[in-house]
Image (cartoon, rainbow, N blue to C red):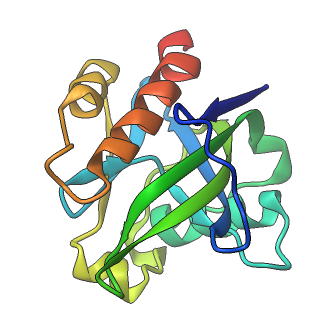
């Protein structure tokens, strides 16, 4: 299944930044869901794919970096792709806005494994933004996701994407 967020029917051209990303809804044996806090925003674990990297290798790498957990191919269940078109995405590094087209593949993982902070390998940017990850119950996760983050740079975009994930995966568990 593919979901598209493009309310303004934007057309991409060569000036747009094009990204491929992966994220996962990771559920533990207590029915809790892993959620990351980066800055003041909550996001599901995952991130950008390297140019030559497959989506599967990227999500395995990202979950290892952000959770300290190794997952096998059989652990990962692809659920949907989310395609987004954002014209005014804020770039923290250049302090400017740009147009961004992203295709994010979402996976679902059920695990008995625990987050291992000693095996995590966070980026300098994640460390600077006080990145944390924890398992939370679905009621608290819903509150976190439904909180309005539009006052934060790009907050409305994260809110929009997280609400789709809540509807498409978490609420169906």
Give the x, y percent position of residue 38.
28, 62
Q: Quadrant of the image for the C terminus? A: top right
Q: Residue at x 62, y 36 (%)?
A: 9
Q: Residue at x 38, y 45 (%)?
A: 158
- Position in image of residue 69 (x %, y %): 57, 61
Where residue 143 sits, quadrant-wise, is top left
| Relative side of 40 to 155, left or right | left
Quarter of the rendering containing residue 149: top left
Eyeballing the image, is 166 above or below 50?
above
- At x 79%, y 79%, the residue is 51
Which corner quadrant of the image does residue 71 belong to? bottom right
Image spot of residue 116 (x, y percent): 43, 64
Total marks shown come to: 0
Quarter of the image that includes the N terminus: top right
Nearer-the-camera pick, 92 or 132: 92
Picture coordinates of residue 18, whole percent (x, y): 68, 66
The answer to whether 131 appears left or right of 1 in the picture is left
Q: State whether residue 43 is above or below residue 171.
A: below
Left or right side of 107 for 145: left
**Residue appearing at x 18%, y 56% in the figure:** 40
Q: Is residue 163 above or below residue 53?
A: above
User: Which one is in front, 65 or 123?
Assistant: 123
**Residue 154 in the figure: left or right of residue 163:** left
Depth check: give the residue in front, 111 or 155.
155
Residue projecting furthest to the top: 172
């Amino acid at each position: 299944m593919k979901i598209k967020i493009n309310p303004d029917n934007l057309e991409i051209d060569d000036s747009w930044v094009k990204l491929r990303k992966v994220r996962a809804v990771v559920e533990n044996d207590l029915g809790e869901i892993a959620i990351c806090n980066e800055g003041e925003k909550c996001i599901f674990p995952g991130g950008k794919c390297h140019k030559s990297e497959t989506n599967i290798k990227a999500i395995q790498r990202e979950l290892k970096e952000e959770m300290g957990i190794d997952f096998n191919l059989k652990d990962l269940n692809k659920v949907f792709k989310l395609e987004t078109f954002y014209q005014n995405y804020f770039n923290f590094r250049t302090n400017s806005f740009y147009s961004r087209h992203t295709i994010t593949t979402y996976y679902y993982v059920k695990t008995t494994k625990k987050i291992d902070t000693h095996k995590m390998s966070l980026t300098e940017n994640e460390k600077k933004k006080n990145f944390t990850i924890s398992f939370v119950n679905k009621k608290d996760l819903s509150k976190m996701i439904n909180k309005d983050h539009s006052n934060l740079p790009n907050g409305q975009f994260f809110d929009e994407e997280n609400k789709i994930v809540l509807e498409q995966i978490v609420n169906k568990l």
